[in-house]
Amino acid sequence: MKKIIAATTAAMLMGIGAATAGDANKIVVDGSTTVGPIAKAFAEYYMGKHPDVNITVSESGSGNGAKGIINGTCDVGTMSRPMKKSEKEAANGAGILPIEHIVAMDGIAMVVHESNPVQGLTIEQIRDIYTGKIANWKELGGPDLPIVVISRDTNSGTYETFESLVMKNAKIAGKTEYVGSNGAIRQRVMSTQGAIGYVGLAFREGVKPVKVNGSEATPETVAAMTYPIARPLYMYTNGRPKQDTPLHDFITLSDSPEGKKIIEDTGFVPVK
């Protein structure tokens, strides 16, 4: 998609989202950087069909998507993980009824620099890299090169999925670098020969995904449930959107043939 619809940082700081959330012809979306490409593509498609509707999309992390729904500063909270029990309790305390909409499936690809000859890793080897037990690529059949470990920040739903499916309560090493988005991980790995990181399926360009437990991170393996690091992607609303409203049409776009094609075009997997 050539056109990018996103709320600027300045707009977010000025509270424009808080001023427009709830307006029938204005939809404010905030949250996951992973779900961001889908939300932006949905916004472009929908506004093309309905020029009277304005949709802004921000990417401040899954945790902020949940906060936006709880605080009423966004109409759609995008998340790459389900809401936590504590977030649901906070929502209920604020008189908010968070409704979960699964819009797509995603795989978390383990990516390295394109020059790295390593072709695959096991979950256990990835865990040992992130705990610091394995610190050089030569231990994995690669070059004599220190491993530069990159992770998403702890506010990220992708981080929490990685922690759950890969780390399994093992502590990530203190030397790990934390960055704020999938794009930032991709850029760091692209520019650093010894780096490893993890990104959503839509962010594999320019880096080399390695197999995990013998399976490649592709839409096909995620759909077949053979790739071991996969998860649903979510949009949350306060209650169920009313029929025949822009919010209802936007949030259910993933169920339509047009929406499924958009999801595929952005590199993710439509929900069957």
Image (cartoon, rainbow, N blue to C red):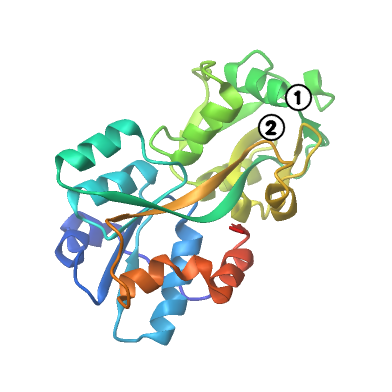
Q: Secondary structure at mark 1?
A: helix
Q: x%, y% of residue 69?
A: 26, 51
Q: Residue at x 60, y 53 (%)?
A: 203
Measure how far apart labels 2 and 1 are at the Cα level: 8 Å
Locate residue 48, reporting x and y percent.
43, 84
Q: Residues within 10 Å of mark 1 (few under 14, many from 20)?
A: many
Q: State whether residue 139 is above or below residue 8.
A: above
Residue 1 visible to the viewer: no
**At 33% across and 32% down in the image, what residue appears?**
85
Nearer the observer, 230 or 102: 102
Which residue is identified by label 1?
137
Q: Quadrant of residue 144?
A: top right
- Image quarter of the N terminus: bottom right
| Image coords of residue 181 (percent x, y) | 47, 46
Return the mark for residue 160. Answer: none
- Which amino acid type corresponds to the residue marked 2 in the rendered image? Gly
Judge from the rendering whether residue 259 lies leftward or rightward of residue 52; answer left or right.
right
Q: Is residue 184 above or below residue 266?
A: above
Q: Is residue 65 left or right of residue 39?
A: left
Mark 2 surroundings: few (<14), some (14-19) or many (≥20) residues within 10 A: many
Q: Is mark 2 in CB contact (under 8 Å) with mark 1?
A: yes
Q: What residue would you read off at disc 2?
A: 194
Q: Amino acid at mark 1?
A: Trp
Q: How many marks?
A: 2
In the rendering, at what x and y percent does residue 193 appear?
Answer: 70, 37
Is residue 119 visible in the rendered image? The answer is yes
Q: Is residue 247 left or right of residue 49?
A: left
